[in-house]
Image (cartoon, rainbow, N blue to C red):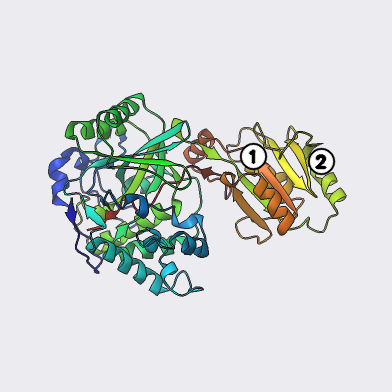
Amino acid sequence: MRQLKSDPVFLCGKDEEMGVLFPELYERCVIDHRLGGETKKKPRKYGGRLLVIIRPFKAVRPRPDVAEKVAALPYDVMSSQEAREMVRENPYSFLHVDKAEIDLEEGVNLYDERVYLKARENLQKMMSGGIFLQDQKPQLYLYRQDVGERKQTGIVACVSIDDYLSQKIKKHEHTRPEKEVDRTRHIKYCNAQTGPIFLTYPAQEKIDHLVSSWEHESQPVYDFTSGDGIRHRVWILNHQGLMQDIIQAFSRIESLYIADGHHRSASAVRIGLECRAENPDFTGDEEFNYFLAVIFPNHQLKILDYNRLVKDLNGLSPGDFLDKVREGFMVTEWTLPGPCHPQAPKHFGMYLEGKWYQLQARPGSYDQQDPVGRLDVSILQDNLLKPVLGIHDPRTDQRIDFVGGIRGLKELEKRVAADMTVAFSLYPTGIDDLMAIADAGTVMPPKSTWFEPKLRSGLFIHMLK
């Protein structure tokens, strides 16, 4: 690893070494779908189809002795005030880069240019101060998280913006323009992708074996347990033959799926396209053609419930509201101890006036053949939130709020006692549903999935020059 020099200028640069170390990566086409660029190379195919590319890179990452202090939750799972509390007495936290408003006056507009300038300044200070170092050769990395008896190990690599544009990297959510612009500006000012995209793929026994063998045969460069009890380990995968085996194994995978990070991936693609416009002779080897990801097999992932709260009953009395609910659901009082935590799809919990109810969707109230319509979040929205409570657009309606399952159902009870009127607990969306919806080229309703554990930011940075 080498110490970094700060560079305030955003450059769209090349990496000549990649073509020497991994020539097979460049036997495919580079097509700019949005700008109308011409095909530069013939597409490399397997079984008659274009291949998914994963690419080693020279990660910028923290020194091992400060990695635990640097690692931070994603920028979008906390408020600015919560972030200020988290970094108190921790100058190493990556939140100083990913949520740089915490180092400006309270109440500053999150999209003020000073926020992006501060992010760049903080990143440069951490790099020039030796907190971050850069590996000298392109490598893959393994990132493992352990939560109790459950573990998930992802391959840290860069993936192609062309695979995103050609929908080989598949989406399941819409993005919001203001958030996409925000992350685009953050990448541009920092000249780096600072937060990895959380991707998944249909598990492959060969990849599982290759990853597991390296975990057992080598020592992690990072090994720490965060305050929430999650153990984080990182391995450098620098064995040339093993890297080639993993790259080749991924070339047989038809698609990758975005689990979390739709705005960051869309922003990375926007930056790549801007750089291509500025560099019409681009070859496809440049770093701006790729973005940072951690790629997990689908069988290791867990999606938690994503629950709903509504401020009022849309003018209905509690009795009239229950009568309306019964039109679309079978309703029974919950008599077991504790909150109603649904144990099967199409079952819901409802908390109203200090009492839990169990709801079950009535047969015929949804289309089992519709991959979106059969989701529990869709059934609740289409048969209760919209027709009964008047929540027509959950993205924009100020009367609805969402609570990730990591906070537990007691959080719903607390919120109803404080500022809400009714709460709904849901059965988690399945990873197979997510992939089926992405394959169908459609999107889920907002706030359909909550993945745990969350990837930590700051352990890997992908520089764009």
Amino acid tagged 2: Arg
Estimate the x, y position of residue 62 in percent, counting from the top left. 28, 52
Number of the label disc, if any, that sits on residue 459? none
Against 297, residue 450 (above or below) is below
Q: Are marks 1 and 2 in contact (CB under 8 Å)?
A: no
Q: Earlier in the sequence, mark 1 or mark 2?
A: 2
Q: Which residue is mark 1?
A: 376
Circle 1 residues within 10 Å: few <14, some 14–19, many ≥20: many
Estimate the x, y position of residue 279 in percent, counting from the top left. 22, 61
Q: Find the distance from the CA under tag 1 to the CA under tag 2.
A: 17 Å
| Depth check, front residue: 99 or 464 | 99
| Depth check, front residue: 263 or 105 | 105
Residue 294 is at least partly visible in this image: yes
Quadrant where the image shows the C terminus: bottom left
Circle 2 residues within 10 Å: few <14, some 14–19, many ≥20: some
Estimate the x, y position of residue 117 in percent, counting from the top left. 34, 71
Against 433, residue 124 (above or below) is below
Q: Residue at x 61, y 39 (%)?
A: 375
Number of the label disc, if any, that sits on residue 326? 2
The kind of secondary structure element at disc 2 is helix
